Amino acid sequence: MTLTELRYAVALADTQHFGRAAERCHVSQSTLSVGIKRLEDDLGVALFERARGAVQLTPIGHSVVERAQRVLVEANGVLELAHVGRNQLGSSLRIGAIYTIGPYLFPHLIPQLHTVAPQMPLYIEENFTHVLRERLREGELDAIIVALPFTEPDVLTKVLYDEALCVLLPAEHPLAAEQRLSADALEDAGLLILGEGHCFRERVLEVCPATQRASVESSSLETIRHMVASGLGVSVLPHSAVSGHHYSPGSVAIRHFSAPVPFRQVAIAWRASFPRPRAIDVLADSVRLCSVSRGPNVEV
């Protein structure tokens, strides 16, 4: 039994397809098939049920693959430890961010981080919180940037910044005449919000509980901004999603909330066992230095 064979088994369990698993592992399908068969022979049990066009785990296969995933995480940790004594900033860092943070943070973060850690390129992923949580736990990501609350056993978190929420309106909307808006003012305004699965959707509904009957749901903040600009409705967005994005004059208006200004807390999370704490510190410091994290003052 080898680590390579365990990687084959995990890949096959994830994809449920020999061809796709081989592609993920960068080997031929026959090589992967031989590796899986050798692993099953060594263990003396069948890990997979094979049928035409379908592959699925046996009951014992579920347990073996679950343990194999943990073994591979620990093995990767050994490799990371080999770098600790040399240069914690000398190899790539795998980070993830939720969809409502990544597009607005990364254009500022990447050049900032490159100035202090030029030998630490980033592998970047944007996804939902629950997906990033799983990929962090399985060792497929080194750190993730999410909105609080976020808890996970054996995972550390550090608050990076507080980000104020703003109201984006069509420029001709009656509420645009106000300089500050209360959440109650948006009750009948036709609020545009993100669809299910986005944690920011839940934060908006906490701020504006009377707007549960949203007129439109969308898959991204960018799409919501465009719909607001077209005059379809109004929306509550994080400050980073409205600052620095220009439409022609007279298209949209940005208004802040009345005090106390609602906000979200953005944090970094990483496994407590991750062997490159210096890389996490440099990443966190770079995020804090980004202009996106320095929005208007949050009055609480």
Image (cartoon, rainbow, N blue to C red):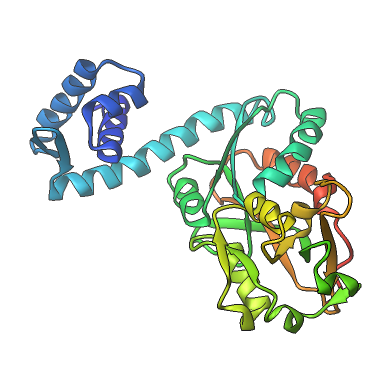
Name the one closer to the observer, 258 or 94.
258
Left or right? Give the position of 11 relative to 178. Answer: left
Q: Position of residue 192 (x, y in %)?
A: 63, 65
Which residue is painted at 87% across and 55% down in the image? 250
Q: Position of residue 199 (x, y in %)?
A: 57, 63
Specify whether residue 150 is in view: no
Q: In the rendered image of this protein, does residue 9 appear above or below residue 25?
A: below
Which quadrant: the C terminus?
Answer: bottom right
Left or right? Give the position of 51 relative to 123. Answer: left
Which residue is painted at 13% across and 29% down in the image? 42
Q: In the rendered image of this protein, does residue 275 appear above or below residue 203?
A: above
Left or right? Give the position of 45 relative to 201. Answer: left
Which residue is painted at 52% across and 41% down in the image? 141
Q: In the rendered image of this protein, does residue 293 appear above or below residue 298?
A: above
Name the one closer to the observer, 225 or 34.
225
Specify whether residue 62 is in view: yes
Left or right? Give the position of 61 relative to 173. Answer: left
Which quadrant: the N terminus?
Answer: top left
Which residue is painted at 35% across and 39% down in the image? 71
